[in-house]
Amino acid sequence: MASNDHLCRINYLYQLSAWHTLALARHDGEQALARAHSRTLDLVAKRTRSKLLPQLKRTLCKRCRRLLVPRRTAECRLDTADTLVVRCRCGSAKRFAVGNDRDYRTFYEKPGNLR
Ligand SMILES: [Zn+2]
C-alpha cells in the first residue's frame, strides 16, 4: 500500500472520529465508537510509520484516544505561567506553552517542510 493510501485512511478515520464525537455522541458512553476510530488511526500511523500533523495530534488524547473538543470532551484553561492546559475527561492533560513565543512553529508547520 502506498504512503498516500495510508494518509487517506488516517484522514478518513479522523473524520469518522470527529463525526461520532460531534454529531452522534450525547453521552460519554456513546463515544466508544469515536475512540475506537481514533485508536485505529493511531495504530495505522504507528504501523505504517506515517507522521501525523501536529494540528491533528494536538486534538487527540494520548491516554484514552478521545478527540479533544473544548467544552464537549475537554476543558481548556490558561495556567498562570501562560500555559494552555487542555484536560480530557479521562483526567489526562496536554500543556501548550502559548505565552513564551507566539510565533513558534513546529518543524512541519514551517513553510517548505511539509511534504
Ligand atoms: Zn483522555
Image (cartoon, grey):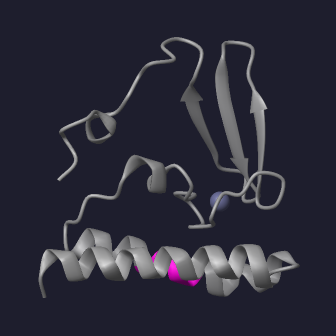
Residue 72 coordinates in the image, percent (x, y): 82, 60
Q: Which residue lies furthest to the right in this view?
A: 26
Instruction: Report the number of discs.
Output: 0
Looking at the image, the residue that sits furthest to the left is 2
Report whether 71 appears left or right of 10: right
Residue 52 position in % (x across, y down): 34, 58
The residue lying toward the viewer, choosing from 108 and 95, is 108
Q: In this view, does 45 lie to the left or right of 62?
A: left
Closest to the observer: 56 or 80? Answer: 56
Residue at 71% x, 75% y is 21
Q: Is residue 113 left or right of residue 74?
A: left
Occupied quadrant, residue 28: bottom right
Direction front: furthest residue? 111
Q: In which quarter of the image is the N terminus?
A: bottom left
Q: Position of residue 4 (x, y in %)?
A: 19, 76
Residue occupying the point 74% across, 73% down: 22
Q: Which residue is drawn at 37% across and 76% down?
A: 10
| Magenta residues (range) | 36-40
Is 80 above or below relative to 32? above
Please give the name of the residue rendered at 62% of the width and 64% of the height, measured from the top-left corner: 67
Membership of 38 in magenta stretch = yes
Q: Main secondary structure of the magenta part?
A: helix
Placement of 32 over or under 84, stated as above or below: below
Q: Which of 80 and 12 is in front in this view?
A: 12
The quarter of the picture showing ligand 1: bottom right
Instruction: Give x and y (percent) for residue 100.
Output: 53, 11
